[in-house]
Amino acid sequence: MKTYEFDEGLKELTEQVVKDIGEEFKHVDIGKILFVKCKGVKKGKFVAQIRKVYGPYVLLAGGHTFVLESNDTLFTPLSPEGKLRVVEHELRHISPASPDKLICHNLKDFVVMIEKYGVDYCK
């Protein structure tokens, strides 16, 4: 059974990524992100994902625009660098042109990470 909990550690990782990346992530407002850990997910579903909060669910999410969720089964065993890179990858979904919107995965998204860190960037 899946369970969720708030994840202050994920928030701290995100703050570090935004600080380290600097100018490229100036549009990321950490105050708009709710950080949660999901436990009980089958292996292989996802490592982390960011989602937009819509409609009345914004109230349930405490007014946050996005939810950044980690899969405890796959995220926790990653190296510290791997965790930072996964968070960086998820933050790249926040649109620089419209910071309240998410952009879908595209090849460029992966190319940036692979060029920067190599094929196994999230190990």
Image (tube, rainbow, N blue to C red):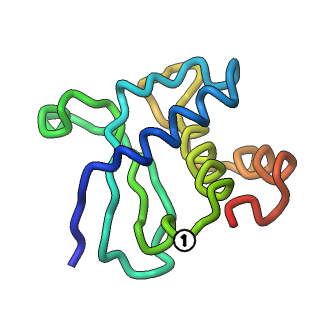
Q: Position of residue 56 (x, y in %)?
A: 12, 35
Q: Is residue 75 left or right of residue 8?
A: right
In the rendered image, the quadrant that contains the C terminus is bottom right
Q: Is residue 14 above or below residue 87?
A: above
Q: Position of residue 51 (x, y in %)?
A: 38, 45
Q: Residue at x 42, y 47 (%)?
A: 9
Q: Residue at x 21, y 27 (%)?
A: 63
- The amino acid marked with disc number 1 is Pro
Q: Quadrant of residue 72?
A: bottom left
Q: Which residue is tagged 1?
A: 77
Secondary structure beneath label 1: loop
In the rendered image, the quadrant that contains the N terminus is bottom left
Total tally of numbered discs in the picture:
1
Q: Residue at x 85, y 58 (%)?
A: 118
Q: Quadrant of residue 8?
A: top left
Q: Position of residue 103 (x, y in %)?
A: 54, 38
**Depth check, front residue: 47 or 51:** 47
Q: Residue at x 51, y 32 (%)?
A: 15
Q: Is residue 83 above or below residue 51?
A: below
Q: Position of residue 16 (x, y in %)?
A: 58, 34
Counting other residues with Cα less than 10 Å from the Cα at mark 1, is it few (<14), some (14-19), or many (20 or more)? few
Q: Quadrant of residue 41?
A: bottom left
Q: Is residue 47 left or right of residue 42?
A: right
**Depth check, front residue: 55 or 51:** 51
**Depth check, front residue: 110 or 18:** 18
Q: Is residue 36 above or below residue 47?
A: above
